[in-house]
Amino acid sequence: MKYIFLTGGVVSSLGKGLTAASLGTLLESRGLKVALQKFDPYLNVDPGTMSPFQHGEVYVLDDGAETDLDLGHYERFTDSTLTRFNNLTSGQVYKTVLEKERRGDYLGKTVQVIPHVTDEIKNRIRLVGEKSGADVIITEIGGTTGDIEGLPFLEAIREFALEVGREHAMFVHVTFVPYIKAAGELKTKPTQQSVAKLREIGIAPDILVARTEKPLEEDLRAKISMFCNVPVEAVIEEIDVAHSIYEVPVMLRREGMDELICKRLGLETTPPDMSRWEDMLQRLCEPKNRVKIGVIGKYIELQDAYKSVYEAVTHGGGANDCGVEIVRVGSEAIENNGGVKSLAGLSGVLVPGGFGERGIEGKIRAAQFARENSVPYLGLCLGMQIASIEFARNALGLDGAHSAEFEPDSPHPIIALLDEQQNVTDMGGTMRLGAQPCRLKEGSRAATLYDTGEINERHRHRYEFNNAYRDQFEAAGFVFSGTSPDGGLVELIELKDHPFYMASQFHPEFLSKPHRPHPLFAGFIKAAHEHASG
Ligand code: GLN
């Protein structure tokens, strides 16, 4: 088993996760089995309790783990299976160490960062190795080199590489080479200093991936090579992509990165086959048609809050030869300035998941606009609850209809707390989480799109459709096209007399891949394109 450790330097937001994921793509294209994991130095046990302002999207796995959004990239770029073991936070490490201490497992020793915390980190690398049986384990260390909280992770990977043998482990450092406009030059000093910081800890990078907005000329590569002590061919340019993040693997391949890695780790592989990936890229980058999709959310100003949703919409575009322009509409803006006017000209309306009351009325108005004007609508989790509340109020005349999450005393609690949630007091990891089976109604649009009768989709919610209202809704043309196998929970809804009005209690965006677009997103973009072409 071989190990690649990815660190980041100079600044955050370099796209380290994308680089790790892209390495996964490249190694898989050579027939290798890869496993990817992320280490996050913060003290939260998982990101599930963090606000999107702090963290961006919380990505959910089949097993219900709430994880860092980089795991979303891993799943979209590779076929590797991820579980809760593939995302380790300092919080988890310390929790385990302290539990062991309380049990007396340390037999009277002083419990210390080295070796007890670092041992726990190394154990996790081994565990992921054992569980995955992969040829290569790619481990991404979150944060920026030089952060105090990242030190135990760096110490752990240094020790680990020594223990497994340096020929089986390598270090890739992703760094930033800024372009200084006034000087008209790219600058290498921050890279030199960040590598120096790593070497202080005892890690000498084997490969430097230089994130840059301008091409790295030969002299600059030579300079980085000389001062950072890596061969010049191990200075890899990762320039800002022109069209799509899915170009990154192709770019790294052009730089010879996979070749370099295989040589360094002594991996004999079949020649790389990137044809499937390149076909997909072509469809994404050179679409014949265009559609405009409005995403109605309260965190639209944040790049990362709806990451998987934006990606899945793009995949749906690829399935239909459509470039997707995503129009981010603030739900509060719909409430305050001019109402649904901002939705004019959209080919589709999407309401993603969310928590809390802010912006809810704006989302309800967006759903109403889509329903009444035959504009394709896709609702995800909260987006399904919104669609149901809107239908109750405006199609069934149930005044004051709402979700108990926002209006506990509503006369018509269309959305109510799940039974299993009644007595939950802890916030962390206690929602209805992860993959759950769902049965599709014969003859429904859902059954046609999925082309099967039973599906498994990922969840993250506390509230559900209130069954007391089912008959009334059904009589008015609201179709419950997906339910839990026992029929007890509503999972998917659609409208009969509408070109495309669908919403799910689950999060289909977590299962969409660029080369395997999710049926709901593919169907949504198809309908949006038809709507746009009149
Ligand atoms: N807030 C809603 C619930 O808990 C929806 C959650 C979501 O959209 N992920 O049920």
Image (tube, rainbow, N blue to C red):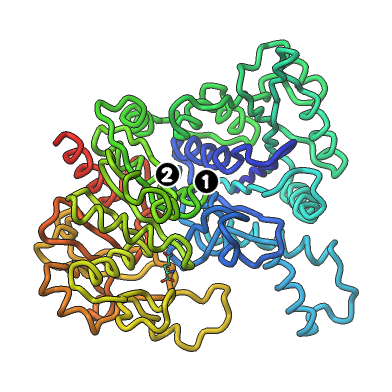
x 46%, y 51%: residue: 306
Q: Are marks 1 and 2 in contact (CB under 8 Å)?
A: yes
Question: Which percent across, then down, holds residue 298?
Answer: 47, 55
Residue that carries the numbered disc 2 in the rendered image: 328
State which quarter of the image contains the C terminus.
Answer: top left
Q: Residues within 10 Å of mark 1 (few under 14, many from 20)?
A: few
x 31%, y 54%: residue: 366
x 44%, y 67%: residue: 460
Ligand 1 lies in quarter: bottom left
Question: Which percent across, then down, holds residue 206?
Answer: 72, 32
Is residue 278 rendered to the left or right of residue 139? left
Is residue 534 rendered to the left or right of residue 66? left
Is residue 302 rendered to the left or right of residue 492? right
Q: Is mark 1 within 8 Å of ligand 1?
A: no
- Can you tell which quarter of the image residue 8 is in? top right
Residue that carries the numbered disc 1 in the rendered image: 301
x 66%, y 12%: residue: 217
Is residue 446 rendered to the left or right of residue 262? left
